Image (cartoon, helix red, strand yellow):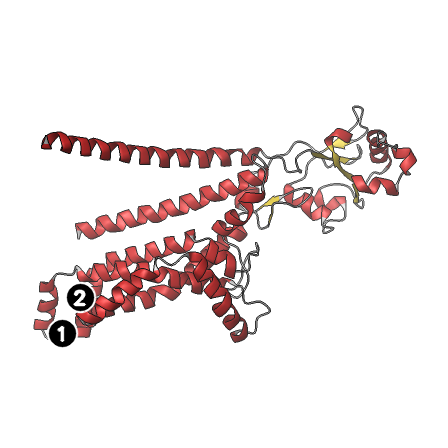
Amino acid sequence: MKRFLEKLVEGALLISGSITSITILLIIIFLFKEASGLFNSPVVEEGYVLAFNKANPVKKLSSYQIKEIFDGKITNWDEVGGKEEPIELVRLSDLTKYYTEEELGANFENIPAKASELTAKHPGIILFLPKNYVAKNFNGTLLKHETLKPGDFFGGKEWYPTASPSPQYGLLPLLLGTIWVSLGAILLSLPFGIAVAVYLAEIATMRVRNILKPIIELLAGIPSVVYGFFGLVVIVPFLQKLFHLPVGETALAGSVVLGIMALPTIITVAEDAMRTVPRAMKEASLALGATHWQTIYKVIIPYAKSGITSAAVLGIGRAIGETMAVLMVTGNAAVIPHTLLEPVRTIPATIAAELGEVSAGSGHYQALFMLGVILFIITMIISISIEFIGKKKYSN
């Protein structure tokens, strides 16, 4: 009977582990599947076309060039490889500047013919209109069906997914924002976390340790939104006054909040690593005449360096994956940061803020899933690093 129960428990554990592994694998497959269509997305807003005069030698434009034209930053065709000709922007709503309402028709039935006529008359025109208003015998040139290229995403410097007529899906502002906030957090939390770990492991009395250790571990259970409120009410106004900033929601505010959130993980892991140092090594160091502090920084810390490194990597992982607290205190601005005193937006915050408002299958939807893929790859690299460090520690 006992043997039967053992087999039953083993089978239940095997099934549980298998289901968990399959579920994780299916999630990863779903993530990559939803993101895979991004580079098949058209550079022009879905359902619309861009039209030129037939005499215009320009036949294709990049997503960024289209945005710059419609933002008024590119004003002549020679800037994009065409002739010396001023660019004339025309949207569907602008047709009333060229034709009366009677000419366009009571039900706008004449728009296709008039759009074709207008395109033929104006050599510098770029016409943006819905596909259903393009006449069968359209007297102009339609922009070639260009799709988003990997370079536009991975090297893009702007994130404007709702821009018209060409959405911008640039990864760099979000990736750099994530890196700045995460590195700032680890630079703030690692020295303090190691110092507290040294105190708990080697200096504090058993009574003090028994009081502080549960309190520190309890900090890890506080919801991130509470940290976000604390940052918004306390840290943001403090930084704004300290540095005389127009707004206090900056990368530095996010780093401070994330640093506080990462402290329990860093302290716990580093302290556990230091407490695994063999007692014989400590006693040998003291017997050779070393002081307590010399033993700490010449024996204990070097021996526990793998565990301390693991604590740092786990802290970085916590910082990179955090969403709500960062969303509340960093300003949520998708721009490339140059200092920690500027508003930023991170990858997790972008996904959380935008995914609920996009239509499934759209380019914006696929771009957000691609951000999830990037975050998954970063997290995987961190996990592999932890595994490597753990093996190195074991071999030592």
Q: Do the residues labelled 1 and 2 touch (CB within 8 Å)?
A: yes
Name the secondary structure under disc 1.
Answer: loop
Instruction: Tell me which residue sits at (26%, 67%) in the image.
Output: 212
Task: Pinpoint residue 38: horizontal percent, then vertical percent.
Answer: 55, 36
205 lies above or below 13: below
| Residue placed under numbered mark 1 in the picture | 290
Q: Which residue is drawn at 39% across and 63% down?
A: 259
Q: Which amino acid does label 1 sit on?
A: Ala
List x then y, in percent, for residue 37.
Answer: 53, 33
Does residue 96 sit above or below 258 in this rendering? above
Q: Residue at x 91, y 34 (%)?
A: 103
Residue 299 tag number: 2
Given residues 18 and 193, the one toward you in this image is: 18
Q: Image quadrant for the N terminus?
A: top left
Q: What element carries label 2?
A: helix
Q: In the rendered image, which quarter is residue 117 located in?
A: top right
User: Is 5 placed left or right of 316 in the picture?
Assistant: left
Q: Nearer the viewer, residue 379 or 359?
A: 359
Residue 75 appears in view = yes
Q: Which amino acid does label 2 sit on?
A: Val
